[in-house]
Image (cartoon, grey):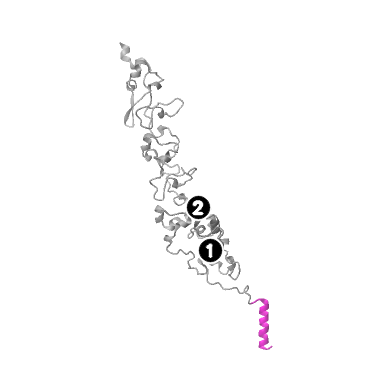
Amino acid sequence: MPKAMLFACLSVAFACTGAFSPQVFPQKAPGPLSKAHSSLDGSCTVCHSKEDGTGEFQCLDCHDEIGSRIKAKRGYHSSVLEPTATSAECAACHAEHQGPDGEFIPWGGPIDDFDHTQTGFTLEGRHTKVQCRKCHSRQNIPAQELATLASRDLDRTFLGLSTDCQVCHVGQSPHGTRFAAEPHGNRCRECHTPKGFVPSTFSLARHGKTRFPLEGAHAATVCADCHTRVRKPEGEELARRFHFESLACVSCHQNPHGTVTTAGHQEPKCEQCHTTNGWRPSSFTRARHVAFPLTGAHLKVPCRLCHDATREVAGRRVMVFRTASKDCAGCHAERAEE
């Protein structure tokens, strides 16, 4: 068979079998993929809707952790993309086929100069001096977020970090679980700022909305005098006490009167005789002296002449009221002998 005829026959055969079709010999990729996508080399349709690599991008089909955040308007991507964004818009910032050493995240300068306000969490106070990876690290990502990032490089990701102070400052709270329940819910910013843990922003006005408003001398009392350090149930560390089981005076003040209590109460009701303006003078009046009604000349007798028994409390002498006799001879012994 002449060579010209043989070449013509082979040309027709190849054309009929599609030997030169792009589906059989696909278009060569424009360059190797990044390190993160290197396992997809040769699998064009994973990222492109056509085998020749020229179709629509499918980034958000795989990176649903980004897509869900954009729709929920959370994080940096939601600040630069609308909730209706498509995968085609990803390529505007993330260019592929630059090889394993290519920079897939373009910072446009040093990473420390990144405008963090675009993430929805503005860096203020001491946060401005913290290195990025000090917060953006694997151990600071909450468990519920880890589930969405399971297949990602958790040592490189900037996703999943919570704005809850406890996530980064776990174990550093001196309050333990005392403010975990509502209405506080561990919202540290109710009392603290990024400028520093102390001083607290909790004010006297806010204390007035608690179960124990500060009045009189209490308003001038140093917080630590009442909110003393106690040992945590879960460890040896000491933490300040902010929740009190009892608001009775004796929970902070030692009772100088010993066994003096009010009928029906296990604790003395100090406020029946004293005010927060000061321990003295007592608000107890002669009209309230019902156990031994004061009449006649008794109305003019100073209290200490009958209540002369004392005891030492915290280095000072105080009256003991219950020991006073109700019998005339108990006070007027000399007169009774005449």
Vertical order, 78 against 288 (above or below): below
User: Mark 2 or mark 1, which is nearer to you?
Assistant: 1
Amino acid at circle 1: Cys
Residue 90: which numbered mark, if any? 1
In percent of width and height, residue 326 lies at 38, 18
Q: Quadrant of the C terminus?
A: top left
Residue at image point 46% right, 46% down: 187
Residue 226 in sight from this viewpoint: yes
In percent of width and height, residue 57 lies at 57, 65
Q: What secondary structure is found at the residue carrying circle 1? A: helix
Q: Is residue 321 magenta?
A: no
In the image, the segment drawn in magenta is 1-19
Q: Is residue 311 left or right of residue 74?
A: left
Amino acid at circle 2: Pro
Density class for disc 1 (Cα within 10 Å; few <14, some 14-19, many ≥20) is: some
Q: Nearer the viewer, residue 115 or 279?
A: 115
Q: What secondary structure is found at the residue carrying circle 2? A: loop
Q: Is residue 7 magenta?
A: yes
In percent of width and height, residue 148 lies at 54, 56
Evaluate if marks 2 and 1 touch, with contact meaning CB atoms under 8 Å apart.
no
Please tell me whether the stretch drawn in magenta is mainly helix, strand or loop: helix
Q: Earlier in the sequence, mark 2 or mark 1?
A: 1
Alpha-carbon distance for marks 2 and 1?
Answer: 26 Å
Q: Nearer the viewer, residue 270 or 2?
A: 270
Q: Nearer the viewer, residue 61 or 264?
A: 61
Q: Is residue 247 left or right of residue 315?
A: right
Residue 241 in sight from this viewpoint: no
In percent of width and height, residue 258 lies at 38, 27
Residue 142: which numbered mark, if any? 2
Tell which residue pokes out farthest to the right in this image: 1
Q: Quadrant of residue 110?
A: bottom left
Q: Quadrant of residue 65?
A: bottom right
